[in-house]
Amino acid sequence: MRQKRIGLIGACLALALGCDDGASDTAAADAATLDAATLDAGPQPDAADAAADSTVDATPDATPPPTCDGVPGARVAFADGAGGFQFGDLAADFTANTLDGPLTLSQHWTGCDSYVFLVYFPDLRQTPQGPWIGDALWDSDPLPLLTLGAPNTHYVFLSFEPDADARRARMEAMRSRIALGISVRPAEMTAGWAERLHFVTDRLTEVEGSLGGFVSDYLDFMFSPEGLVDLGDRGMAQAPLPFTFGIDRFQRWDAGGSLSPVVGQAQTWAMAAYFGPFYNHMAAVRARVAAEPATEVVLLDERVSDRVFVRTVTLPDAAAMAQVDTLDLDVGVFCPARNPFGCSEWDRIAYVELCLDGPDCADRREIARWITPYWRRGERRWLIDASPFLALLRAGGDTTFRVEMGPEWERKTERDARIALRLRTTGDAPRAQGAERAFTGGSFGADYNTREPFTFTPPADADRVELVLILSGHGQTDGDNCAEWCDHRHAFTVNGADIPVVRSQQAPGTLRGCADRAGEGVPPGQWGNWAPGRAYWCPGLPVEAIRIDVTEHVQPGVENTVTYRGQFGAREPAGGDIALSAYVVWYGE
């Protein structure tokens, strides 16, 4: 992980924040102090009154189907109520005047859509120097919102300009720009696009109902002492301007976040296209959990600021565990901070490990891994398949696990963390009966391949054998950026037979390789270099176990031998670090 500049969409306050890694004149201008006095935040209606005033009868003529057509996740009925203004709170009803008439959330709510808000802020700096970030963002190409985004996402354009004529002119110009882009594309490609675009003529903070109140409340927070985060010797970090934010599939406010594809680069509307796919991912996870009956064993469910936890839980007994064929880890983390710099900063390796020696937990086996996101407010959630490691849990009863969400020494930040084992019997999955760790990683240098072969003896009745790898590369050596960004490969043999070389399915270094996986759970809007593709991983995504069937090369009931070598392309290791847990797992009845 390379040190990144704390460039704000809004601002770094006057104290130095190390904002000099490749910062352009524009980036330096972004870091100027904003003038709170110029922010006429407008009226701030009581949330309950605003919701009541704008309530309409949104009852449909017929009950819609429980599922959504063409997008993952279940339909969610519109929720009446006052809601709130924190990220994750219910977004109550609102009515915004647009170029095409009123937009009332309850009337437009289908239970399958999400809303992404895209805001123009005029230059609010007290001492403007250089171009204004808001102008460059507004002038960026909006068409990728439609070409890259999810088909069930609405885009709502707004302005904070105080002059009504200026706001209307800005919205008309944006609508014309998009219409021109649509007109040169095939009609079958653009069907339905226009219905998902809304151009608001009200001032941002004066929209009737929850929308105006939400933004007004956030701006008050942003310019208050509570809006600052102390980053130690890097100074104080101010909360950013809300150039984008969202309402997700569950009718909850989402923070949005940075629209820069890479730290130091200009923000673009194109990066807001990834919020819709992420909201669909979150809806899909919730729907899957609801649809798949499971025995749930909770490892952690609390607000925490520490990063390492050892927990002893009680699994079902051995007879019940013998029937289980599927293990998923349900991992959910919510950062409640309104300022993203109050969330965890770095893309750290996070683990769930089984403690073989009980609470002492000196002898551990990794069963799941994910990478934490950079500075991201709000919720992320994933289901991580750990079924091969049921082999280590068959005894049931009291069992100790270790959860690590980054190094213990890192700056403490609050998170609501919930991590649970989901034990299921599907009847159509092989049952893992034994597992042995064969290899681990380490420094990816000249000594990496000085390791002995591994031998194992599966029982005579084993009917399937796999190599199971939890694998990611980290570090950035000069010249080749190994092993985070380089093409590191992993070669195994089983009893002398070559196994196909393991390579990252995601090409490292692609500009938006990780952004394109927002629909798999990568949280967009992170305040770091989250968008480019890495070798085997992304910030804010599980590192899925790689499972290789080697049954044809294994002789059950006798000793077998596995060898392993790491490679940089077709050459020897080049530097950095490999985080590897490689297991031999066998299956049977």
Image: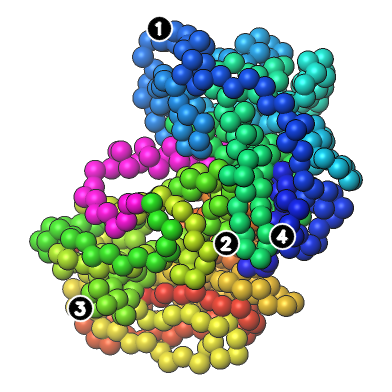
| Circle 1: residue type | Asp
The tag on residue 143 is none
Q: Is residue 27 above or below residue 272?
A: below
Q: CA distance from mark 4 to mark 2?
A: 16 Å
Dot 2 or dot 3: first in sequence order is 2
Residue found at x 43% / y 58% = 305
| 586 is within the stretch colored magenta | no
Residue found at x 27% / y 64% = 311
Q: Are marks 3 and 4 in contact (CB under 8 Å)?
A: no
| Circle 3: residue type | Pro
Of circles 4 and 1, the one toward us is 4
Q: CA distance from mark 1 to mark 3?
A: 62 Å
Q: Are marks 1 and 3 in contact (CB under 8 Å)?
A: no
Dot 3 or dot 4: first in sequence order is 4
Residue 323 place in picture, x, y as percent: 16, 57
Q: Are marks 1 and 2 in contact (CB under 8 Å)?
A: no
The tag on residue 61 is 1
Q: CA distance from mark 3 to mark 4?
A: 59 Å
Badge 3 element:
loop
In this orientation, which residue lies closer to the viewer: 195 or 188? 195
Residue 211 visible in the displayed image: no
The tag on residue 459 is 3
Residue 188 place in picture, x, y as percent: 66, 25
| 299 is within the stretch colored magenta | yes
Q: Identify the residue under disc 4.
A: 17
| Circle 2: residue type | Trp
Dot 4 or dot 2: first in sequence order is 4
Circle 4 Cα neighbour tier, 10 Å, few/some/many (<14 / 14–19 / ≥20): some
Dot 1 or dot 2: first in sequence order is 1
| Circle 4: residue type | Leu
Of circles 4 and 2, the one toward us is 4
The tag on residue 346 is 2
